[in-house]
Amino acid sequence: MIIAIDGPAASGKGTLGKRLAQHYGYRHLDTGVIYRAVAYGLIQAGQDLRDEAAAVAVALELDPEEFGNPALKSHEVGQAASVVSAIPRVREVLLNFQRQFAADPPGAVLDGRDIGTVICPNADVKIFVVADPKVRARRRTLEAQSRGEAADEAAILADIIQRDERDQNRPVAPLKPAPDAYLLDNSQLDIEGGVRAAIDIIEAVRAGRSRG
Ligand code: DC
């Protein structure tokens, strides 16, 4: 089974993806990390984020071992990933890796922006996670503070709004719900509540299928 989770920055889709993978015994891929790794590689090399050839070269050399690097989590890298991910050839290079990950047994949960629309259009269940931008900014602020970082909530909110805007309006694979995605608004839910709501959706889809 393939579970596709899409949604905007800081909507909680990564945490949800991880929890669902644990629940079902599947593998989990946070696809944002892949774009972050490309952006980070460019920043490290002192290269322009809009340099297509340089970005494609970094994407071709990606090492999944690097995906756990905590430096990928920063706001700066997230913003840079949003720029790099708008380059169509970068997306093309990263497509097969994601599809292969999804296809390997026993099943997979992928989260990102275009999983249900482009990467896995035939996913068994698609969930589009949303939350009020102010709620998302609050969560990111608390997260940063818990890592001991200083965090300016107003700046984080501005960053989230700018990233939503860029991710939704790019010509290639923009952030949008697949027509057959289930909408999950977790503005008023804690992590456990969000996980329960997602499992309810998945189980309802499975039950519908087996009645089929
Ligand atoms: O989910 P995230 O914040 O880690 O994603 C970082 C950026 O990467 C995001 O602003 C847009 C891009 N991205 C994408 O274009 N497609 C994906 N499937 C995942 C992320």
Image (cartoon, helix red, strand yellow):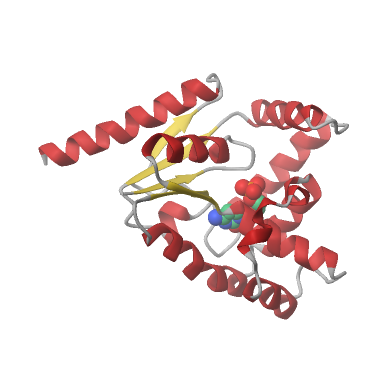
| The image quarter in which residue 139 lies | top right
Q: Is residue 169 visible?
A: no
Residue in the picture at 84% in, 71% down: 47
Image: 137 above or below 99: above
Q: Residue furthest bottom?
A: 53
37 sits left or right of 102 in the view: right
- Horizontal side of residue 44 vs 142, given as left or right: right
Q: From the viewer's perspective, is 140 left or right of 27?
A: right
**Quadrant in the picture for the C terminus:** top left
Locate residue 185, reporting x and y percent.
49, 29
Q: Residue at x 49, y 55 (%)?
A: 114
Q: Residue at x 76, y 42 (%)?
A: 159
| Vertical position of residue 17 compared to residue 198: above or below | below
Question: Is residue 141 shown above or below 91?
Answer: above
Q: Position of residue 98 (x, y in %)?
A: 49, 62
Q: Residue at x 56, y 54 (%)?
A: 31
- Residue 204 visible, this orientation: yes
Percent x, y of residue 56: 66, 76
Pick the front one: 201 or 173: 201
Q: How many marks?
A: 0
Closest to the observer: 128 or 69?
A: 69
Q: Position of residue 64 (x, y in %)?
A: 61, 62
- Front residue of 173/46: it is 46
